[in-house]
Amino acid sequence: MQFRKGRPKILRLISEEPKFNIFKPVGIPKNELESVVLTLEELESLRLVDYVGQSHEDAADSMGISRRVFWNILKSARKKVSDALINGKMIDIGGGYYQIRKCNEQECQGMPCRFGLSNCFKNKNKDNEL
């Protein structure tokens, strides 16, 4: 049995499981493609910084990790996505060391959801009002 050196790894907080778990070039069967595995925390780091537009500091806070760890996750994610796009590889999304973040009324405090969650308390209430 191998023991991990250093501090224990903490769960990374993500907003939700992705709707899709595979992206691939059109017209080529899956079994003929090389693939890269993008973990859910890597996908979350891309979502927070590149899609939602959070700073690295805010994104790290949203995921419950240090800026250094966040940067390493984001760097890995960008390298994998670049490799897949440039070399025509399939992106297989799954795995990782994560926990789904739950938003509640106290976290939101009447402000737009800072995590950009679709399962946010306020977003659910807005849907019910319409």
Image (spheres, helix red, strand yellow):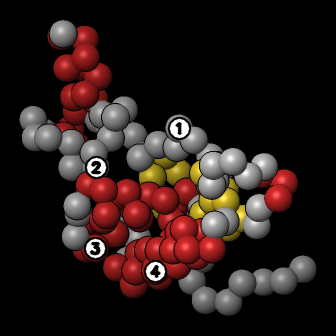
Q: Nearer the viewer, mark 1 or mark 2?
A: 1
Q: Nearer the viewer, mark 2 or mark 4?
A: 4
The circle on residue 115 is 2
Residue placed at 28% from the left, 49% from the top? 115
Residue placed at 9% from the left, 35% from the top? 110
Number of residues whose C-alpha sits closer than 10 Å to that of mark 1, classed few (under 14), some (14–19) or many (20 or more): few
Amino acid on which disc 4 is placed: Lys
Residue placed at 14% from the left, 41% from the top? 112
Image quadrant occupied by the C terminus: top left
Give the CA separation, mark 1 to mark 4: 23 Å
Residue corresponding to mark 3: 56
Residue 20 percent coordinates (x, y):
57, 41
- The reply, left or right, for residue 120 in relation to residue 39 is left
Mark earlier in primary sequence (3, 4): 3
Number of residues whose C-alpha sits closer than 10 Å to that of mark 3, classed few (under 14), some (14–19) or many (20 or more): some
Residue placed at 63% from the left, 67% from the top? 88
Residue corresponding to mark 4: 75
Secondary element under disc 4, as helix, strand or loop, is helix
- The part of the image, by quadrant, that contains residue 3 is bottom right
Mark earlier in primary sequence (1, 3): 1
Mark earlier in primary sequence (1, 4): 1
Secondary element under disc 2, as helix, strand or loop, is loop
Residue 100 percent coordinates (x, y):
49, 46
Amino acid on which disc 2 is placed: Phe
Give the CA separation, mark 1 to mark 3: 24 Å
Image quadrant occupied by the N terminus: bottom right
The circle on residue 65 is none
Q: Is residue 98 visible?
A: no
Residue corresponding to mark 1: 19
